[in-house]
Amino acid sequence: MASAAEVSAVKSHSVLSWPAVLGSLALVLLGLLAWELRWVLLVLFGAVVLAVALDVPVQMLLKRFQLQRPQALGLVVLALLLLAWVLGTLLLPELLEQIQTLNELLPQLLQRVAAVLGEVRGLEQLAQGLASGSLLSAMQPLSGQLLGLAGGAANTSIQLLLMALLALLLCLDPTSHNNLLIAATPNFYRQHSRKLLKESREALGGWLAGMTLSAVTVFLLTWAGLVWLQVPLALLSGLICGLLTFVPTIGPSVATLLPTALALVVSPLLALKVLILRLVLQNLEAFVLTPLLLSRTVNLLPTVALMAQLSLGALLGLPGVLLALPFVVVLQVLLQEVFVKEIMDRWTLQQQS
């Protein structure tokens, strides 16, 4: 027959297990709800990223001039619209013309690449696919899907408009939104929550500013180098190289394919010069420019960044790929401050006597 102490221990264990069961069930339901609302959460996180990007120049104006936040935000938005209009007026006609030229040169480009690959042992089948156009036909559904995700559908346009509107509202009054998040945490943890939000904002803002400067520098240097080498479609190639700077590890390598292939249409020697130019710029960006710009903020490991893009891309498609790196920047700060410092560093092995 069980003693009173054993019965009490069993009752205490059963009472303590119910909160754990209810908590686990609540986490499962919360995960299911988040999955059902994943597109809403994606738009919200994209708005947060845009708001932080807008807040960086807003903070600079607030520190330098005696302005209110709405006035500073209005000046930043006006400057961005003016910059977009100037760049659109100067570069958009040439860019559209080069895109049309690329479409016309594509069959000739594939034939030239197929001729080069046909001389390499083991790549004869790939060369035949390029020469016959079957590989290009197989890629057309994928390209159409990417273009649809990029903004061809009306639903995507509405999501982008909502994202921009939410970003403006968040940037207009960040203190109230921070207080709303902090109020949702326990009282004893609110001071630390405020610190986490501040560090996450600084890391994300520093990463966005650093990567933007790096991408612009790569775009200008690549454009200037290709113009100097007299490579066709230099503006389009430079723009693609600059944009793919945001995709570490594989982005710069993939971006090199277009200018190298276009130079190959002219001559193999020109293609070699373009390849050398891109290798120099890639190493300059990877080992000098990016570490210098991101020295005071979070610098992502290439493997972590690549796995995040593959994972979110598989779950959410192209929008997940675009927002994977900002998400990892914030997640890395939270893991460092919460998981490592508060859980793993305080984990002690208690020995039973």
Image (cartoon, helix red, strand yellow):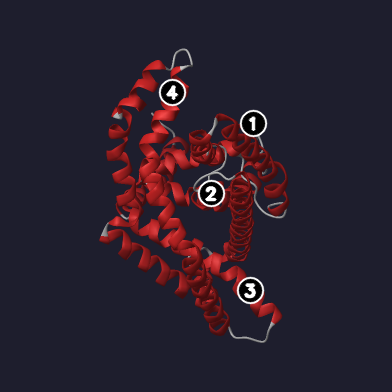
Q: Tell me whether the residue at label 3 lies in contact with that at label 2, contact meaning CB atoms closer than 8 angstroms.
A: no
Give the Cα distance between marks 4 and 1. 73 Å
Q: Secondary structure at mark 1?
A: loop
Query: From where the camera sits, is residue 18 visible?
Result: no
Task: Judge from the rendering whether residue 1 lies leftward or rightward of residue 266; answer left or right.
Answer: left
Callout 1, which amino acid?
Answer: Gln
Residue under pointer 3: 59
Q: Which mark is residue 115?
A: 4
Callout 4, which amino acid?
Answer: Ala
Dot 2 or dot 1, earlier in sequence: 2
* Screen quadrant of the C terminus: top right
| Circle nearer the viewer, 4 or 1 | 4
Residue under pointer 1: 352
| Circle nearer the viewer, 2 or 1 | 2
Q: Which mark is residue 103?
A: none
Give the Cα distance between marks 4 and 2. 23 Å
Task: Judge from the rendering whether residue 202 lies leftward or rightward of residue 124; answer left or right.
Answer: right
User: Where residue 335 appears, x then y in whole percent?
Assistant: 58, 47
Residue under pointer 2: 234
| Circle nearer the viewer, 3 or 4 | 4
Callout 2, which amino acid?
Answer: Ala
Dot 3 or dot 4, earlier in sequence: 3
- At a point 55% along the width and 44% down the height, the residue shown is 231
Dot 4 or dot 1, earlier in sequence: 4
Query: From where the camera sits, is residue 39 visible?
Result: yes
Question: Which of the pair 106/40 is nearer the observer?
Answer: 106
Q: Secondary structure at mark 4?
A: helix
Give the Cα distance between marks 3 and 4. 55 Å
- At a point 64% along the width and 54% down the height, the residue shown is 217
Give the Cα distance between marks 2 and 1. 71 Å
Dot 3 or dot 2, earlier in sequence: 3
